[in-house]
Image: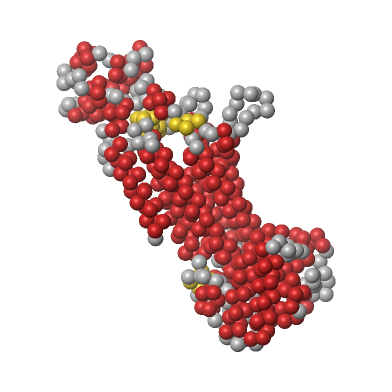
Amino acid sequence: MSTQKLWGGRFQAQADAWVDEFGASINFDQLMADEDIEGSLAHVKMLKKTEILSASDCDQIIAGLEELRDDLHADHLEFTVENEDIHMNIESILTDKIGPVAGKLHTGRSRNDQVATDFHLYVKNRLPKIIEEIKTIQKTLVTLAEDNVETIMPGYTHLQHAQPISYGHYLMAYYSMLKRDVERFEFNMKHADISPLGAAALAGTTFPIDREFTAKELGFGDIYVNSLDAVSDRDFALEFLSNASILMMHLSRFCEEISMWVSYEFNYLELSDKYTTGSSIMPQKKNPDMAELIRGKSGRVYGHLLGLLSTMKSLPLAYNKDLQEDKEGTFDTVKTLLPALKVFNGMISTIKVHKDNMYHATENDFSNATELADYLATKGIPFREAHGIVGQLVLKGIETHKNLQDISMEEFKQISPLIEEDVYEELKPEVAVKRRNSLGGTGFKQVKMQIEKAKKELNEEVHS
């Protein structure tokens, strides 16, 4: 393969090998080899259509590029640091294959719009895969929620027992988070789906190119209307990294709770052996390593977002070599995200719910205190006064190891003669949950409505 610099005409001295290696991006941007060849095919077909190049030259280049694509898929291409990046490596290999006519491929374009096109295609091609994996998790959550509508567990604020809730309601909260994640990635598609090809270095080109043709060939839905913006914009990558960070934050929160809830102290859940590991020294251990690793990888993704934001913040228009730093973090995020989503889905789809343990945790925790306050309020006692009364009862209960449902009717009558035997029914955790039927509440009817709505959403997406 030729290693003479394709841009070296005005240079008299060559860089040392270690300088070339520092400046090269081929070690990571070869992941865009497919996109680079596709972009070049679209460009040369446009050069043929517009008669900027002769049909015979274009046909020769097209045949050579198609051979290169076959070689790439067969893992027969070798890239070199001397040729810096994927674009120059592909052109150099093409030159070795078809001769000097390969040099005509670059007519009417620059590496600046070429790399932007490749990067857009890379992100655009992977967004649907990420969205699909998120929706798979959503389906798993809906199935799990449907099996646990009437599973009672403590609801928490400040990690303190607050009010009893349906475990199905808890699961559907994460469904809603993931729904917003899907929407963010779908919007990301809009900005990844814009073609920079034809912007050339920064100012467009004097050749009579047809940008609409290349955009259509590559499946882009829109075209950058400003050439400066086209080669310097990385908003679509920042959006991707931001969306990925929010998604990983959601998974991390879920994994944090899984890690707590599989512990002896909670024992609400049990993970499959497939998604846990043991200890090299403590035979009894069953560690939630996959949940912990997903939680840990969220920091990795956050770092890539902050890295690119920092790289972009002071760049003057248009292209700068700094923009070479846009890809590694994005590539690593894709590499991190897709396996994390697959592992997460496998983990929650095989999870065992200890329903009795969840329920028993709501019996001795005073999480029905609000129910008693509400009950008193329905009897005509101002809620703020009822709140104070119940607070004193909770304090007394803690001191005497007596739960609210264990208070005698005689003691209740001392608080208010309006309290009747029905108060004991109201204080049951399952009744407290069932009665919360305000829109979006944890009441069983409301949870079932959430599940049916989610099923409809997922079914519509399948058939849209």
Q: Is residue 302 above or below residue 417?
A: below
> x, y percentage for residue 286?
58, 29
Residue depicted at 35% across the width and 51% down the height = 456
Relative to 252, 411 lies left or right: left
The percent position of residue 360, horizontal first and vertical second, equals 39, 23
Q: Quadrant of residue 232?
A: bottom right
Q: Is residue 175 left or right of residue 42?
A: left
Quadrant location of the C terminus in the rendered image? bottom left
**What colour scheme has been applied to the protein in the rendered image?**
secondary structure
- Residue located 48% across and 62% down the image: 189
- In the image, is 282 to the left or to the right of 269? right
The answer to whether residue 243 shows anywhere in this view is no
Q: Nearer the viewer, residue 356 or 405?
A: 356
In this rendering, is residue 91 above or below 128?
Answer: below
Q: Position of residue 194 (x, y in %)?
A: 51, 69
Q: Position of residue 73 (x, y in %)?
A: 67, 63
Indicate whether 180 appears above or below 85. Answer: above
